[in-house]
Amino acid sequence: MDEYYSVSQVALILKVHPLTIRRYIREEKLNAFRAGGNIRISASDLRSFIEGFTPNVQKNPGLKTKKKKPFSLSDPFFRLRARGLSMNKS
C-alpha cells in the first residue's frame, strides 16, 4: 500500500513553502489528487518528482556589480534642509 502526504508534509520534506507545492500541482509538475476535501500526494509521485526535478536557478540581483559614484559631500542628499536640522554649520 502506498503512503500519502499532505501539502504541508511535502513542503516540509522539500524545504519549501506550501504555496510552492500548490503551484507545482497547479502547473502539473507534481501529481496530486483530492481526497475528502484535502490534497494528497502519493509517495511514489513525490519520489518521481524529486528524481526528475531540476530547480530554476536565478542569479541573485543583490550581487550585481554596478559602477557606483564615489561618496562626496556635494551629494544632493546633504543639501536637504529640515526643520531645526541641517548638515551645514550656517
Image: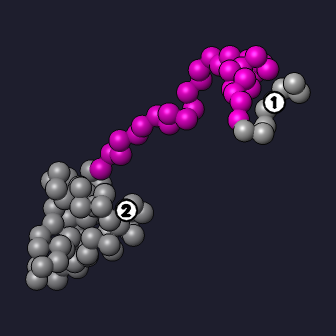
Image location of residue 43, percent across then percent down: 24, 71
Quadrant location of residue 38?
A: bottom left
Q: Give the SS element for disc 2.
A: loop
Quarter of the figure with residue 51:
bottom left
Residue 5 falls inside the magenta stretch? no
Residue 48 visible: no
- In this picture, is 68 found above or below 23? above
> Which one is nearer the viewer's eye here, 37 or 11?
37
**CA separation, marks 1 and 2?**
46 Å
Q: Return the x and y of residue 14 as percentages of the image width and height.
A: 38, 63
Q: Give the colour scheme of this rendering.
A: one colour
**The quadrant where residue 47 appears:** bottom left
Mark 2, other Cα within 10 Å: few <14 / some 14–19 / many ≥20: few
Q: Residue at x 38, y 68 (%)?
A: 13
Which structural element holds mark 1? loop
Please name the residue that numbered disc 2 is placed on.
17
- Magenta stretch, residue numbers: 53-82
Q: What residue type is labelled 1?
A: Met
Task: Name the residue that disc number 1 marks.
Answer: 87
